[in-house]
Image (cartoon, rainbow, N blue to C red):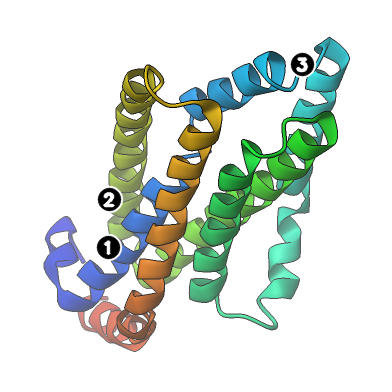
Amino acid sequence: MTANDITAPAARRMFVFLLILTVASRLWGFKDGGTLINNFAVEIGHLDGFEMGLVQSIREIPGFLALLVIYLLLFISEHRLGVLSVLIMGVGVAMTGFLPTTHGIILTTLIMSFGFHYYETVNQSLTLQYFDHAMALFVFGRLRSMGAATDIAVGLLILLLSRWLGYTQLFVGLGGVAIAAGLWCLTLRGSAGGCISAAVAMYSRTA
């Protein structure tokens, strides 16, 4: 299978599915988003150095618990878990502006982090399942490049909109986009869900 095979219907649907969720997940998992949350915590939440360190430490807990994805997959498919993870992340982002306290910021940060880390785990798994090794490298590269482009675009957008919007509006906007992307990917579930057999057949023909 070559990079050109991404134009095949099954591969294209799967790629679009992963691309939309990856871009949506970068609304929180990018440097500008982290800076926005840190500024909000200090300027609005009035967190001191110790509290900021506590928030940053707790934020990494979901990364260590990503292995629990294995158990979640006993009850939910990887496609739905990926979408659900992005939806949870979006809800956490949208809630942030309404909870300008230490406990509130810890709560929303934890919610966002669970969504982000669990999606990243599922994203890699789905890519390796649906594409052979050569194609997976191409897909990983495309997703990473689009994620980097999203970082830049969202950073510039925040810089522009911050002239007229407050923290609450910015968080609701970013979270709303992530939620909308997740909900739209649910409509792709029927198409993406049928990709696995087509992808396996495609791989068998080219192996």
Graded by Cα atoms within 10 Å as few (under 14), some (14 to 19) or many (20 or more), the crowding at tag 2 reads some
Spot occupied by residue 181 in the image (x, y as percentages of width and height): 38, 59
**Quadrant for the C terminus in the image:** bottom left
Secondary structure found at label 2:
helix
The mark that comes first in sequence, 2 or 3, is 3
The mark that comes first in sequence, 1 or 2, is 1
Graded by Cα atoms within 10 Å as few (under 14), some (14 to 19) or many (20 or more), the crowding at tag 1 reads some
Which residue has dot 3 on it? 46
Toward the top, the furthest residue is 49
Which of labels 2 and 3 is toward the front?
3
Mark 1 is on which residue type? Val
Toward the right, the furthest residue is 50
Which residue has dot 2 on it? 138
Secondary structure found at label 1:
helix
Spot occupied by residue 101 in the image (x, y as percentages of width and height): 79, 30
Mark 2 is on which residue type? Phe
Which residue has dot 1 on it? 16
Spot occupied by residue 72 in the image (x, y as percentages of width and height): 70, 73
Spot occupied by residue 141 in the image (x, y as percentages of width and height): 31, 43
Above or below, 139 relative to 141? below
Which of labels 3 and 1 is toward the front?
3
Task: Give the side of residue 154 with respect to residue 55, left or right.
Answer: left
| CA gap, disc 2 and disc 3 | 44 Å
Q: Residue at x 49, y 26 (%)?
A: 166
The answer to which of 3 and 123 lies nearer the viewer is 123
Secondary structure found at label 3:
loop
| CA gap, disc 1 and disc 2 | 14 Å
One can see residue 26 in this view: no
